[in-house]
Amino acid sequence: MRNRILLMHKRVHRVQLTEAAQIMLRRLIEQHGPVLFHLSGGCCDGSSPMCFPTREFRVGGADILLGRLPWHTEFWMGGDQFERWKHTHLTVDVVEGRGSGFSLEAPEGVRFIVRSRLLTVEERAVLDAGPPPPTGAERLT
C-alpha cells in the first residue's frame, strides 16, 4: 500500500526522448525555432512522429496532447490514435534513414521513430486518477 501511495504522488509521463533524439531535437530547434511533434496514426509515415515548426502546424480539435518534452516541445497525437494507444508509453528515438514525410529531420538523413511499451498497472492508475489529457479543442479556445 505504501508503494501505491508513493506512486500516486509520482509524475507519470506518456512520452519521453532518447538521448539521441534529444540531441537531434535541440539541433532542429536551433535551426527552426520552437517545434512540436505530431503522430497522426495515418498510413505510411503516419505511424512515425513528425516534427514541425510550431508556427507552421495547426493542431486539430480532436488531437490529444500526450506530453511536453524538453525545450517546451509538445507531443500531439491524433484522437483516434490515442484511443488505440492510450495504454502505452512512447519513447521517441532517432535512426538513420529518411522517412517519406515532411518532418524537419529528413534533410539530416535521419528519422524519428517511436518505441512503445504497455504502461504498468501502477502507471495507468496514476494517469486514470488525474485529469484527461488536453485536446486541441482546448488549445483553440
Image (tube, rainbow, N blue to C red):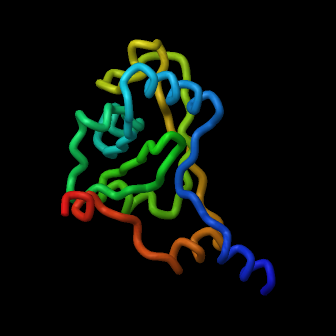
Q: Judge from the rendering whether residue 109 lies leftward or rightward of residue 33; answer left or right.
A: right
| Residue 123 point in image, percent of width and height | 62, 68
| Residue 29 point in image, percent of width and height | 44, 28
Front residue of 137/101: it is 137
User: Which residue reaches farthest bottom?
Assistant: 1
Q: Judge from the rendering whether residue 85 lies leftward or rightward of residue 43; answer left or right.
A: right
Q: Residue at x 55, y 23 (%)?
A: 95
| Residue 105 point in image, percent of width and height | 42, 22
Quadrant into which the N terminus falls: bottom right
Res 37 → quadrant: top left
Q: Residue at x 44, y 42 (%)?
A: 73
In the rendered view, tell whether residue 116 sits above or below residue 118.
Answer: above
Q: Residue at x 60, y 52 (%)?
A: 117
Q: Residue at x 62, y 65 (%)?
A: 11
In the rendered view, tell whether residue 55 sits above or below residue 69.
Answer: above
Q: Judge from the rendering whether residue 28 lies leftward or rightward of residue 102; answer left or right.
A: right
Front residue of 16/55: it is 55
Quadrant into which the C terminus falls: bottom left
Q: How many marks?
A: 0
In the rendered view, tell whether residue 141 sits above or below residue 25.
Answer: below
User: Which residue reaches farthest right?
Assistant: 2
